[in-house]
Image: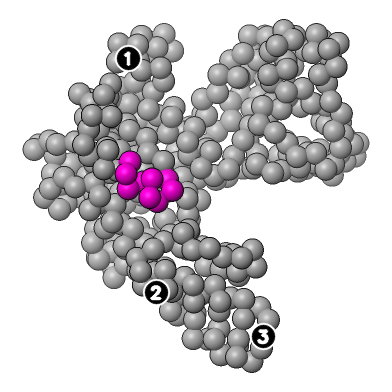
Amino acid sequence: MSLTTGIVGLPNVGKSTLFNAITQAGAEMANYPFCTIEPNVGIVSVPDKRLDKLTEMYHPKRTVPTTFEFTDIAGLVKGASKGEGLGNQFLANIRQVDAIAHVVRCFDDKNITHVSGKIDPIEDIETINLELILSDMEQINKRIDRVEKLARQKDKQSIIEFSALQKLKQAFDEGKPARHVPLTEEEEAAIKPFNLLTNKPVLYVANISEDDVASSEDNRYVQAVKEFAEKDGAEVVAISARIESEIAELDGGEKKAFLEDLGLESSGLDRLIAKSYDLLGLATYFTAGEKEVRAWTFRKGTKAPQAAGIIHSDFERGFIRAEIISFDDLIAAGSELAAKEKGNLRLEGKDYVMQDGDIVNFRFNV
């Protein structure tokens, strides 16, 4: 399942530093705007303690986590929707991602320049949001006149689309993103091909200094971002990109000790990955045995045959049933055999909606 979260923000807010920490992919970093020109793409394993528990239980020959994709996109400047800076390329790259991790600078450092000359995360957020709205507005304006003519001719699909476009135009005029516009299911389907920038789910990433890692709640910039995000219906993850870069280079034991020294239970990156995963409505099921314990990504609401197809198309085509034990039932029982003896093994058919944490054995015949 190829879904990606784009890491966006103004130049010099720490996007590439954060991307390096996430993927350890070696994206170029420098203290000047437009360091990132072509988007860097990296794959990261999704941290999941349940996978560790299953590995302890089954002792497989290998353990395979599920993965998630991040894209580091060039920094945007005011006027991007009119082609300023790398605006056109930036906006085109954002259109290709499924969700947005919006990095904002929440620390003071005279040695690191800021494109606007001052630290104001809300102004930074509003700068990018405005450019995304202006880009979407341009797209809507190109379409609305033509659709209005067809709607007047009583074309049913055009009437639905025109209604949606009118709502969006009003919202954009008021400075509101598309994701805040209430649309019917038919209207949502009508505008889906536009792949609107402001319709993508957003997660705000507050990049803080090393000194604020253990006490980000006291950072006035972070508090301002949280207040803004609450109104936007979004979440905030506070991260020190520089610290996360150091953590990413440590092995398991060293990483745990380092986090304990900082007074943290998990790294900021683990929280960012988990929230990005959830932002896209993703969940995980597992297959487990002596040969392999593996995590698989699926969209929430996926039915069993389609989930089986994630492993192989033959599994979906010849689906018979799914044998399922929930992770919690398995752990409570202590073993797969004990779980079966307690009646925790369920046989589910084609209409079963997969649940996060399901441990599955698919039966199929091709």
User: In the shown orientation, is residue 336 left or right of residue 170?
Assistant: right
Q: Which residues are magenta?
A: 226-234
Amino acid, disc 3: Asp
Q: Earlier in the sequence, mark 1 or mark 3?
A: 3
Q: Residues within 10 Å of mark 1 (few under 14, many from 20)?
A: few
- Residue bearing the label numbered 1: 263
Q: Quick check: is 89 in the magenta stretch?
A: no
The residue lying at 76 percent from left, 27 percent from top is: 360
Instruction: Give how far apart the Cα atoms at labels 1 and 3 are.
Output: 62 Å
Q: Distance of mark 2 from mark 1, alpha carbons? A: 48 Å
Q: Secondary structure at mark 2?
A: helix
Q: Which mark is residue 155?
A: 3
Q: Which mark is residue 20?
A: none
- Return the x and y of residue 101 as percentages of the image width and height: 40, 44
Residue 190 appears in the picture as rendered: yes
Image coordinates of residue 164 in percent, x first then y, are 54, 72
Q: Determine the residue positioned at 64% across, 92% down.
A: 153
